[in-house]
Image: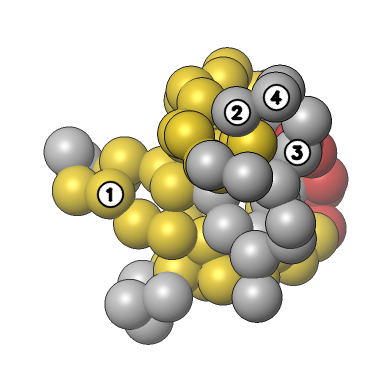
Amino acid sequence: MPRVMQTLEVMPDGVRRGDVIAVGGIPHRVRNVRELRGRRKRLEFEDGNVFVLGPWVAIKVSRDRTVGGGPARPWR
């Protein structure tokens, strides 16, 4: 089934592996998400960069979806 990218606004708890986030205008694909003290999230990107999100920051992510609207297979 064909895949499309969907842009969503999520809180840090909603960030998933495989999401694409633009930091400083540069897109980064999330490789791993870890929870830190104070409900902050540490996002590790495929290119080796790391970004820490506060618990109340809404961000825009691009996520792979199937054309039928359901979630695509998990990103590996």
Which class describes the residues within 10 Å of circle 3: few (<14), some (14-19), or many (20+)?
few
**Disc 1, SS:** strand
Q: Are marks 2 and 3 in contact (CB under 8 Å)?
A: no
> Pointer 2: what residue?
67
Q: Is residue 66 above or below residue 31?
A: above
Kind of residue indicated by mark 1: Pro
Q: Position of residue 9 (x, y in %)?
A: 58, 18
Kind of residue indicated by mark 3: Pro
> Pointer 3: what residue?
71
Q: Residue furthest front?
A: 1
Between 64 and 49, the one lying in front of the other is 64
Compared across the picture, whether 67 is left or right of 70 comes to: left
> Pointer 4: what residue?
68
**Residue ID at (75%, 38%):** 71
> Pointer 1: what residue?
27
Q: Position of residue 60 (x, y in %)?
A: 48, 25
Of discs 1 and 3, which sits in the foreground? Answer: 3
Q: Are marks 4 and 1 in contact (CB under 8 Å)?
A: no
